[in-house]
């Protein structure tokens, strides 16, 4: 009691005194919940003015109907109502909603003086409890002290002063709301992450230092499907994830669709709107909800839905005005974030296109020069090779001279092969497209390489699945696959295995028929991986470095792509993907990658 008397004289703010009193009772009596409910004019309902529980959580206002006969009689007769263990004779729905759990015991103490009944002091516990007379007596004294607080407040504050105090409290609330809006708008204008914007707004609405609402949901427009989709959700003191809810923009969309179509905020009770009942957790009584459209540059981007289900507080015009201001800031922030994302993506595409253009110009110049040089070298080379072959026939006795001439013939042949590859790369090929079976082309390439694989002790494993016909130039695709198979053989001088498979794949660009060639060689050095499709780049002692470059160009002209999965020390897999759609898909940028998980051929 001394502490209670001290609280009564420590401050003139009635709300603060009531909150400290119920907190003191919770600590002193070790109960799960204590609340003071003021009896409103007419005596037909209570309003929760102050409450606390073992976690010191402050409750908001909550209307409570007292039509239960036991509680009504206790209040009228000014006597305690004691329930040591809850029974079905005494309803518990309101108390369960207020406390947040199922109470097992109850103690109600009328707060009154000789003339006026101010309300009731209610204690709830989460397990059965025998309330001893000493506890009841102490709580009766506490209720008398609370009645004194209420009586003295009415005496000390005339109606004019109470009006001033009410206005001061309202102004303080407005200052807090405006301060929150100021802070949140500054933060929203400095971020370009759409997800961070949504989470920040939810926290501003439901946070401890936010606008005081208990729940909030943000739904954004999907312009292609013409629906609203829930994106962010939150509750006071909790972080919740959004649910997969889609709201159509027609009469079935309820208040949310109407707010989007009419571009105005709507206040409605959730129980009267099936869509709002679907958004909130089903089976829970809902208070008034505010549905506010998010508008930026005359365009509706979504809606914000808020309510205060804990204290059943009505949504006022001032509340709607504050949420509308926040929605405006949110719309501008989302519009800026989307614009930034679009500009960033466009800039990356321009940089990539500029690089491709520079590469194309460089390759065009190189190709023209290579073609000229190849023709200039080819003519005398053919003469040298022809004369050397004739000289071999003439020189019969001199074995040393004949051996030298044979070396000349072999080297001339190698140079001619390099020149032919150079001309293939530099010149635009003559294309002849038709519908072909990729599996059949693979079989022909393997037949051509059969003898070389046998001589090198290389086994071939095939996994060719049933695939549709594709539109391609058979000669060029055969050239591509032959180059890859030849590289696989050269990568396994001591023997090994090659796995050739075909399949159908789907991705964002559409459907592809894929042929994958995987070897068990040593793989590609990581430092060289990004250069393997560049012309004249090779890691072999012999070779022009044009085989993969030509293959890459052929596949690109077909609207396909080549993907590489490199396993250093274990082998490499080349996947040639050709579109099922006959129309070209344009140039595909090669992005080789190292495969982290290493797998061996079975």
Image: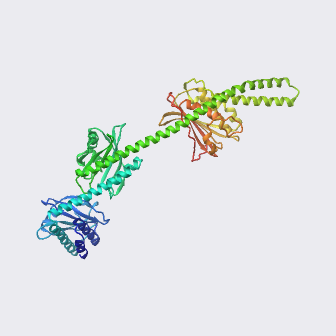
Where is residue 214 shown, x and y percent of the image? 29, 55
Compared with 378, 161 (above or below) is below
Residue drawn at point x = 47 percent, y = 37 percent: 508
Compared with 405, 128 (above or below) is below
Residue 341 shows in this picture: yes
Which image quarter holds the C terminus?
A: top right
In the depicted view, which residue is nearer to us: 578 or 601?
578
In the depicted view, which residue is nearer to us: 246 or 88?
246
In the depicted view, which residue is nearer to us: 162 or 570?
162
In which quarter of the view is residue 415 placed?
top right
358 sits left or right of 496 in the view: left
Compared with 198, 364 (above or below) is above
Compared with 260, 381 (above or below) is above
In the depicted view, which residue is nearer to us: 381 or 287?
381
Where is residue 120 shown, x and y percent of the image? 18, 66
Where is residue 294 shown, x and y percent of the image? 32, 44
Where is residue 457 shown, x and y percent of the image? 69, 38
| Colouring rule applied to residues | rainbow
């Amino acid at each position: 009691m001394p502490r209670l008397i001290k609280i009564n004289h420590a401050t003139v703010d009635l709300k603060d005194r009531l909150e400290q009193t119920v907190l003191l009772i919770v600590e002193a009596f070790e109960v799960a919940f204590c609340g003071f409910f003021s009896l409103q004019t007419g005596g037909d309902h209570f309003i929760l003015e102050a409450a606390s529980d073992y976690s010191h959580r402050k409750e908001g206002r909550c209307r409570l109907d007292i039509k239960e006969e036991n509680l009504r009689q206790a209040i009228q007769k000014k006597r305690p109502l004691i329930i040591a263990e809850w029974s079905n004779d005494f309803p518990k729905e309101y108390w369960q909603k207020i406390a947040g759990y199922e109470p097992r015991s109850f103690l109600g103490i009328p707060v009154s003086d000789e003339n006026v009944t101010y309300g009731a002091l209610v204690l709830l516990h989460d397990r059965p409890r025998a309330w001893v007379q000493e506890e009841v007596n102490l709580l009766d004294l506490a209720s008398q002290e609370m009645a004194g607080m209420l009586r003295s407040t009415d005496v000390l504050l005339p109606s004019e002063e109470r009006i001033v105090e009410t206005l001061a409290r309202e102004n303080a609330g407005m200052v807090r709301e405006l301060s929150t809006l100021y802070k949140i708008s500054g933060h929203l204008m400095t971020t370009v992450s759409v997800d961070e914007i949504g989470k920040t707004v939810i926290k501003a609405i439901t946070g401890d230092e936010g606008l005081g609402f208990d729940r909030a949901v943000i739904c954004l427009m999907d312009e292609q499907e013409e629906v609203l989709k829930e994106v962010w959700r939150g509750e006071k003191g909790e972080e919740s994830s959004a649910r997969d809810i889609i709201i159509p923009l027609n009469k079935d969309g309820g208040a949310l669709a109407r707010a989007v179509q009419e571009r105005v905020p709507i206040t409605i009770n959730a129980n009267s709107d099936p869509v709002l009942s679907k958004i909130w957790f089903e089976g829970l009584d809902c208070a008034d909800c505010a549905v506010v459209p998010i508008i930026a540059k005359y365009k509706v981007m979504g809606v914000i839905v808020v309510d205060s289900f804990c204290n059943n507080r009505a949504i006022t015009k001032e509340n709607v005005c504050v949420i509308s201001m926040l929605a405006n800031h949110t719309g501008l922030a989302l519009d800026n974030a989307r614009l930034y994302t679009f500009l960033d993506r466009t800039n990356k595409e321009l940089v990539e296109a500029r690089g491709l253009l520079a590469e194309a110009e460089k390759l065009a110049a190189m190709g023209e020069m290579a073609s000229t040089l190849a023709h200039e070298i080819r003519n005398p080379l053919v003469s040298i090779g022809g004369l050397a072959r004739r000289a071999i026939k003439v020189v019969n006795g001199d074995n040393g001279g004949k051996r030298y001439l044979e070396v000349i013939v072999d080297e001339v042949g190698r140079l001619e092969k390099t020149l032919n590859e150079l001309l293939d790369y530099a010149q635009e090929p003559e294309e002849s497209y038709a519908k072909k079976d990729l599996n059949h082309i693979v079989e022909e390439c393997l037949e051509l390489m059969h003898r070389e694989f046998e001589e090198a002790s290389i086994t071939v494993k095939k996994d060719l699945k049933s695939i549709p016909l594709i539109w391609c130039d058979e000669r060029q695709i055969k050239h591509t696959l032959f180059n890859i198979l030849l590289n696989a053989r050269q990568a396994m001088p001591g023997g090994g295995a090659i796995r050739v498979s075909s399949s159908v794949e789907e991705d964002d660009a559409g459907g592809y028929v894929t042929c994958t060639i995987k070897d068990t060689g040593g793989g590609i050095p990581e430092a060289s991986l990004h250069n393997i499709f560049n012309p004249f780049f090779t890691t072999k002692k012999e070779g022009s470095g044009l085989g993969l470059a030509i293959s890459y160009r052929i596949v690109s002209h077909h609207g396909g792509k080549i993907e590489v999965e490199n396993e250093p020390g274990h082998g490499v897999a080349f996947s040639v993907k050709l579109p099922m759609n006959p129309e070209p898909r344009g140039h595909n940028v090669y992005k080789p990658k190292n495969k982290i998980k290493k797998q061996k051929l079975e």
